[in-house]
Amino acid sequence: MFERDIFGEEHHQFRETVRRFFRKEVEPYVARWETEGMFPRDIFRKAGAAGLLQVGLPAEYGGGGGDFLHQVIFQEEHGYSTAGASVEGFLATDLSSYVIWRAGTDEQKRYWIPRYASGEVVAEVGITEPQSGSDVANVRTTAIRNGDHYVLNGTKIWLTNLSHCDLLIVVARTDPATKSAGGLSVLLVDADSPGITRSRPIETAARGSGNVGQVFFENVRVPADRLLGGVEGRGLAQIMLVVNDARLTNAARWLASCETAYGLTLDFVRNREAFGQRVLDFQNTQFRMADMKTEIAVGRAFLDKYLLKGLAGTITFDETAMVKLWISELEGRVMDQCVQLHGGMGFANESPISKMWTSARVHRIYLGTSEMQRLAIAKGIRAD
């Protein structure tokens, strides 16, 4: 929809590979997956065999040897596909892999990242608990050292791809006497360990073919060498290391979804007739389409500027908060307008725009609510 100058030829080639994968391996099957309630586990191995997973991580550690923009493209193609909203989190496990890449020991990186890249391992970060969402410092799950193991007790909720998860990256309190974030650590936990119970999928408004759920830990014994980075008390800092990356890559996906929704809506109003003329011929329709096109163009210029800062490693926490806030709120406005212009068909599940609209709503909550982003931005303002 818009010309962009932040990508090189290698990036464009990678985008075409990802796009072909979605057209061939995802879009023809997504309706069946929705009926069955989940996409198949082997889609990860297919993506790994196609060279799509962890392309932005160094080849030395089993990644694809690309850069941050490769990971951005991978997320964007989730948004450019009409199946993207239906498969929810799907193949984009970059948050969990980047936690290990940014904060793990050399041994942990060499063991886990190749397994991500091949599709052998599906992982999810467990931060949120029923009583603590954006308030990460209020985590109550505990991991108490006992000899050469930690004993893990507690619960985590809203874990994506839960039925397929092999690895849970769990934020837990290793020092119960320290109630602040300083008592938190991160453990790499085998999802099938004795004492772990997975809930049935939590039914959400999106009703896609992915799933989220809750995990309960009861005296789960975790080997001490599964402590991320080998040091206790750095859990919050380790997670926050990758929040900037996650905000940027997810914002890229959401803006791509806006472009997709705009294109679907433009096709619809061009071909739909009402009162003897095309819906596009009504001035009200033209004004709404003009507003959306302009807002998306502004969002594109805004986001691409900060994607380059992310690539360079110079972006700040409050800048990614601005990106996350603006793009998620923009997506909400665009999806609402697109549904309105589709009329009754916009509310039908058989219409892609319906799924995109319902899926987009959580993005103003996921990775920190819009209110938390405003607080982060305000903190930066006070420090100026």
Image (cartoon, rainbow, N blue to C red):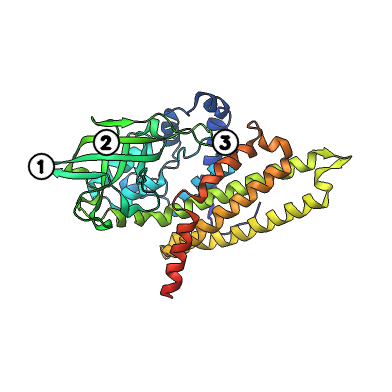
> Callout 1, which amino acid?
Gly
Q: Determine contact: label 2, label 3, CB under 8 Å.
A: no
Q: Determine contact: label 2, label 1, CB under 8 Å.
A: no
Distance from disc 2 to disc 3, alpha carbons, whole Å, reads 33 Å
Q: Residue furthest right?
A: 276
Residue 86 locus on image (x, y percent): 54, 35
> Callout 2, which amino acid?
Phe
Front of the two marks 2 and 1: 2
- Residue 158: quadrant of the picture: top left
Q: Residue furthest left?
A: 147
Q: Provide the secondary structure element on which disc 2 rests.
A: strand
Rendered residue at 35%/56% (across/down): 240
Crowding around mark 1 (Cα neighbors within 10 Å: few <14, some 14 to 19, many 20+) is few
Q: Earlier in the sequence, mark 1 or mark 3?
A: 3
Which residue is identified by label 1?
Answer: 147
Which residue is identified by label 3?
Answer: 83
Crowding around mark 3 (Cα neighbors within 10 Å: few <14, some 14 to 19, many 20+) is many
Q: In the rendered view, does 21 fall on the left or right side of 344?
A: left
> Callout 3, which amino acid?
Ala
